[in-house]
Image (tube, coloured by chain):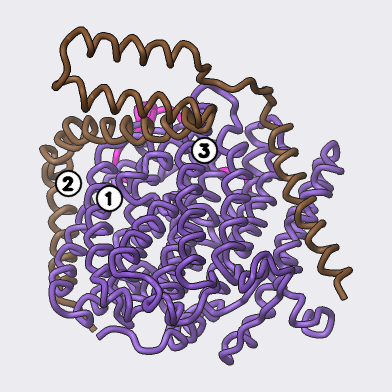
Chain colours: A brown, B purple
Amino acid sequence: MILIDEPLMYAFVAFWIIWVAVRRKEPGRWLIRFCEGPLMTFAAFMDWNVMRMAGFFVWLSRNPAAALRIKGKEMMLKVEKPSVTPERAAEYERELEETRRRQPIREPMVRLNIGTAMLLVLLFIALYLMAMFIRTWLAP
Amino acid sequence: MIEDLIPIAYRPLLAILCPAIASIFIVLFGKRPNIRESWTMLASILQFLIIFSMVPIIIEGNVIKYTFFTAFPNVDFGFSVDAFGLIFAITSSFLWILVSSYSIGYMRSLHEHAQTRYYFCFAFAIFGAVGVALSGNLLTMFIFYEILTVSTYPLVAHDQTPEALFAGRKYLAYLLTSGVFFLAAVVLTYYFAGTTDFVSGGIPNLVSEASRTALMVLFAIFLLGFMKAAWMPFHSWLPTAMAAPTPVSALLHAVAVVKAGVFGIVRVVCYIYGIDLMHGLGLGLALAFLATFTLIVANLFALAQDNLKRRLAYSTINQLSLIIFGVALLSHEGIVGAMMHIPFHGFMKITLFMCAGAIMVASGKRNISEMAGIGKTMPVTMIAFTIGALGMCALPPTAGYITHHFFVHGSEEAGGTMTLFPYILLIVAILDVMYFFPIIYTAFFEKSEGSRGKSKIKEAPLLMLVPIAITATVSIIFYFYPDMFYISELVETAVRSLGGVHP
């Protein structure tokens, strides 16, 4: 059965082939230029923001307590800044800096290479599954 | 033979364990490449046979269950093989056989380093993918989903160049963040419904236990949990991951990773929420708009790419949204199209990626602008590429044409605003033509710069060429006979089990 959009689709394919055969270049150069320019800039902007979100999660996971305290103070500063004196606002900012300085962002951690890390993750999964399997097996 | 050897209840477990066991032997025989690769081939063939042996049972409307243990009350860690899961499992396991053969040719031709790690992680990725396909509930699916993410990271970063390592980090940043949302959605579903099992037609008490707003928020969290489906704006990990070797790109795009994402979305729509609830909440239309946005913007992004693999990556983003679009229609034809497009797109896209890899191995060319006249020196590869490209443009005689029919009919069947979508599908197909046809034109009709002298470029090794020829042929066979591998029969069984679909 022929669909409503099929004749239009075939017409476009025929148009594309004839255009290329006659003019020796693809139709719709303006669209391609638009895609290469403004649209790719927009794509990079979206990507940057998503990576920032992922970066925030990574930052949060390194020391959640400190991260939440810092974020809380940042929010408080933003909310109260317009309604307090400049001296008080400066004091808030100093407090925030002090919190950032006193509380290490990164918990002490051990660095592993990819292979070892992978092996450890898989080993833990395997151990967990084996433990659960044995538990079920031994259950009356 | 398998019917007599392995009891039915153990087949899902054995099918999943095949690649996991093979991965151990791959490491053990790491220093003997021929034996190492033999294990990969053996495991892939065996896995496919075991999975395929379950087809007659499932087509009769049965479900094969295997429970490992009970993790929480009403939540088992176990497998449940139904028709929809089997479609994904058949696709992944069959394509693993072909990608394994292709990988041997590719990795050896380019003298790639760390081949044992590569084959080990590849087998583990298939373990994750088939685990996702055969999962009986959200918790099991989540565990295999994360295994898939972790095991594919070393594959994406395989080259260990700064670009590859960045791609790997970005891949993890997106997909592990997504995993957090998925876990949250699993916990919330359990909190609301007291179960995370997949139920044909949706979990019955979900609607009574949660408010309308809560269900809508939960659906949004589910969507964020399935960033593997590369819907926009959470798509950019996929083009960046093109830094990986080509067989890995094939794995990402056709066999396992992105398919696990759309598979998850279809599972949530049809087996957690159910068609009626989705329709009642108006989530179908919202999902259709999201998919349509991705469909058009991904195609526009593809137009701007000169790197062949990146262009194909944006094409994948577009095609995945087509699957999401199909299920968002909440109509019989739409869901049939969505389920069918998972294997169909798998075969067509793997053809395109394997062709891109063959071109790179034979000529070292990665950009479309450098491929003038390559169709004359690599005719088999480029004919296969043309078949895959026609499929992406929904043109006959390829599998893509069949599913396009289903999507258009599905839109009309859904009625209301949805009747406008065939025109959007037409625009999408036109954009597909605009970025696929120039590649074919450049390859067959443009003259290469050094065309006067005899070209040294020739076809890729036979181990790479045979899988390309097979997948291209299957892409055409699906047009004439969509029931190959019992795909259409399994789809019908799956949709029938969903009960009443809208309208």
> Disc 2 residue type?
Val
Is B456 colored magenta in this rendering? yes
Task: Indicate the chain on which mark 1 is placed.
Answer: B
* Residue drawn 26% across the image and 31% down it: A45
> Disc 1 residue type?
Phe
* Residue drawn 39% across the image and 45% down it: B313
Callout 1: SS: helix
Local packing at callout 1 (Cα closer than 10 Å; few below 14, some 14-19, many 20+) is: many
Q: Is residue B314 left or right of residue B356?
A: left
Along the viewing direction, whichever of A10 and A91 lies nearer the viewer: A91
The span shown in magenta is B443-462
Task: Indicate the chain on which mark 3 is placed.
Answer: B
Give x and y (percent) for residue B415.
17, 80
Callout 3: SS: helix
> Disc 3 residue type?
Leu
Task: Indicate the chain on which mark 2 is placed.
Answer: A
Along the viewing direction, whichever of B369 and B164 lies nearer the viewer: B164
Give x and y (percent) for residue A3.
19, 77
Quarter of the rendering occupied by the C terminus of chain B: bottom left
Q: Which mark is residue B437?
A: 1
Give residue B485's quadrant in the image.
Answer: bottom right
Q: Is residue B216 above or below residue B229?
A: below
Q: Magenta region, mostly helix, strand or loop?
A: loop
Pair 2/3: label in front: 3
Pair 1/2: label in front: 1
The Cα–Cα distance between marks 1 and 2, rounded to whole angstroms, is 10 Å
Quarter of the rendering occupied by the N terminus of chain B: bottom right
* Residue drawn 29% across the image and 10% down it: A91
Q: Which residue is mark 3?
A: B172
Give x and y (percent) for residue A100.
43, 15
Q: Earlier in the sequence, mark 1 or mark 3?
A: 3
The Cα–Cα distance between marks 2 and 3, rounded to whole angstroms, is 42 Å
